[in-house]
Amino acid sequence: MRYLVIILVVLVFSSCEKTEKIEDYPTHKSLLVSNCIFGQSNGFNFMLSKSLSPLDNAPFKQLVHPRAFVKLFENEVMVDSFGFRTVNNNTFLESAIVPKPNFKYRFEAFFPGFAKVSGEDIMPEIIDIVDVKSSKIVKNYDFSSALTLDMDLILSNTHQNNDYIILEFNRPVDIDTNGASYFYEDLTGLKLNNATLEYEHFDNKLYIKTNGQKINQISIRRESIEYAYGIQSVQNKMEVSIANCSKTTFEYLRRFNLQQYNEFDPFAEPTPISNNIINGYGIFGAMGLTMKEFTF
């Protein structure tokens, strides 16, 4: 019994506890965050915010200031300088300049209280979808059906800088006379049949690296399970969009979507978001986007 008391006393006095105050840690200095993915269809539209410390619980919000402005350069020649404007209670920081294929664009953003930030990227050419050839296999069940689509996308052969491509597939959802959706499609498989191309699949998108190959045809297999409620409907339309990206844009969107894809997976590793802004954070990236709807 005596030895037990001695052991307990030793344990009590040997334990220690150290309290750290938040004030003991160095203060995090916020940097300006600038996000702009530009293209011929959407021009240059900037979103400015600021970085937050991991200990900062402030909500994310857009930064707006009457003395903030952006300079835009095309092949190192300044082509525009603009600030914030408000239309119908919506605030914009955008340029009317339409980017040209194979031109380099650079910006400089100025915001009171922050260091000047900048970034640059080259506008790629748009890859046109000349034609879509498809074949389908349908297996019907009691309350659902399985649809397999084999698609060949015939692309224009005039584009350059097509090392990074993002393909997205969407099907329109029918609406009944009461305005309610009664069709739901569960995408179970999206595969690239071009054996020499490297790709990743998240949801309804394929992130493709061509590794320098000049391609004019991409072969896709798309599998889904469809559930129809109420009136049975045959969905025979597909929207396919193809984005020809710079490496900067590709990596940002790939990592961002991977992060969203793994959001509720407790075993997924954190995905760092790519950044190409000097003196700050964010993305200034180019994208050539085209879309085609076809019936299968």
Image (tube, helix red, strand yellow):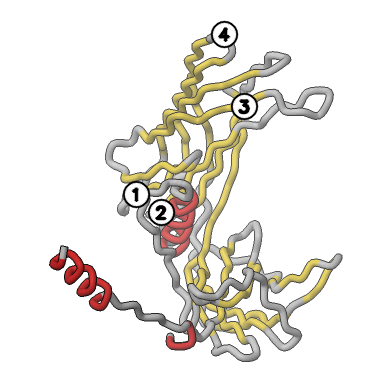
Kindly check if marks 2 and 4 are in contact, taking CB atoms under 8 A apart as contact.
no
Kindly check if marks 2 and 1 are in contact, taking CB atoms under 8 A apart as contact.
yes
Residue occupying the point 68% across, 18% down: 229
Residue 269 picture location, percent across and down: 35, 55
Residue occupying the point 36% across, 48% down: 267
| Pair 2/3: label in front | 3
Q: Earlier in the sequence, mark 2 or mark 1?
A: 2
| Pair 1/3: label in front | 3
- How far apart in space, not on screen, are marks 4 and 1 (Cα)? 42 Å
Quarter containing the N terminus: bottom left
Given residues 120 and 33, the one toward you in this image is 33
- How far apart in space, not on screen, are marks 2 and 1 (Cα)? 6 Å
Secondary element under disc 1, as helix, strand or loop, is loop
Secondary element under disc 4, as helix, strand or loop, is loop
For label 1, the crowd category at 10 Å Cα-Cα, with few meaning under 14, some 14 to 19 and many 20 or more, is: some
For label 3, the crowd category at 10 Å Cα-Cα, with few meaning under 14, some 14 to 19 and many 20 or more, is: some
Residue 142 tag number: 4
Q: Residue furthest right?
A: 88
Residue 210 tag number: 1
Residue 144 picture location, percent across and down: 56, 15
Kindly check if marks 1 and 3 are in contact, taking CB atoms under 8 A apart as contact.
no
Kindly check if marks 4 and 1 are in contact, taking CB atoms under 8 A apart as contact.
no
Residue 184 tag number: 3
Q: Amino acid at mark 2?
A: Tyr
Residue occupying the point 62% across, 34% down: 293
| Residue 280 seen anywhere in this rendered image of the structure | yes
Where residue 202 sits, quadrant-wise, is top left
Side of 169 where 228 appears, left or right: right
- How far apart in space, not on screen, are marks 4 and 3 (Cα)? 15 Å
